[in-house]
Amino acid sequence: MKLTTALSVGVLSTFVWSAPALAETSVVDLISPSRCTLSGGRLTRCAIPTQTLNATPFTSAVPLRTTVRRVLTGNCSTQYPLEVTLTPPGNPGTRYTFLGTPELVLRDLDRELIASLELKDSSPWTNAAAFNETCRVSLNITWNEVDVDSAAQAQTILQGLQGTLATKIAQREHLASLVEYSAAFDYMKTLSNSFLVDLNNETAHALHVQALEAGPVIFQAAMGCGGVLTAEESITLTNFYFVLGSLGDPTKYHHPDGSPKTLEELIGPAALPVIQKLSQLSEAGAKEQYQAQYLVAAQEAAAAQAQVDLATAQLAPWLNP
């Protein structure tokens, strides 16, 4: 743990470095002899300068809040409702009547880290007010605390981040499957077409035609060559006849003009829309697109995991008291 103290014009900042977050406090002097004129036992003509207060930035996975606490000592009785306006970057200002309000909680619109605050005197009565010489008023600003008050709140925050992580992982795995499928579909289509070439090339077409023409002759030879073929030879020739029939009609793999049919034509019209849709997943550039999307999804999943890990550490005081 490292304790650091820094003093700027009217602002004392103290912060303690510790994992997983940074607890930091700034002290701003509002009413004191350094801000007012001391005369006749009274503090008069006070002036609160406009100033920018800066916090030390750090990474957070959980909502944060900044708390402003008024510290008052001595006799600070006055009829005037003195106030300052505190404005974070990109957020509307909040008016703080500090003499009558002990504490003010500030939150960024997105409940993220507040990097700085503009403190501005927004009361017309500051210069007119008079205080007993014992009066001292300052603000203690505790920057960017975890905005959690109970174990239930901590659990809700963590569950939300875990849900986001689950979604990111599912997206990553879906894209990984698309990358793998695109490559597999290309391979299977190439393999199918290679088999198809063996079925519908010119030699195969001639074999289909000749098998159709020679079938009756072979059958007649097998059945009517008594004395020429032995019984075993006749059976062999008969079996050959039936095997030729399995080649099917020449038009099964070829058009009437003898040109070969494509794989899409062979599978039939019912399956064609499915093949066309699947083919789009592996068309030129698709695989590269899936790969690029997968890399982005993988980075987002890793970032979501880091958020869960960081939130678990930040919320540990509530989750594991």
Image (cartoon, rainbow, N blue to C red):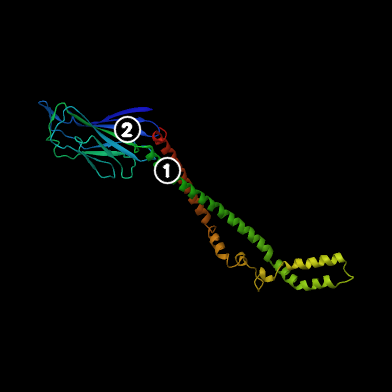
Q: Where, by quadrant of the figure, is residue 56 drawn?
A: top left
Packing grade of label 1 (10 A; few <14, some 14-19, many >=20) is: few
Q: Type of residue at label 1?
A: Gln
Residue drawn at x 75%, y 67% is: 244
Q: Please state, as top left, top right, bottom left or bottom right, where the N terminus lies in the image.
A: top left
Q: Is residue 52 left or right of residue 301?
A: left
Residue 132 shown left or right of residue 63 in the figure: left
Nearer the camera: disc 2 or disc 1: 1
Whether 298 is drawn above or below 212: the answer is above
- Residue 9 drawn at (x, y percent): 24, 31
Q: Is residue 70 left or right of residue 230?
A: left
- Disc 1 is placed on an element classified as helix
Q: Is residue 60 visible?
A: no
Q: Residue at x 83, y 70 (%)?
A: 222
Q: Position of residue 125 (x, y in %)?
A: 13, 38
On the question of residue 198 being in view, the answer is yes
Name the disc covering residue 1, or none: none
- Upstream in sequence: badge 2 or badge 1: 2
Checking the image for residue 24, the label placed there is 2
Q: Which residue is mark 1?
A: 159
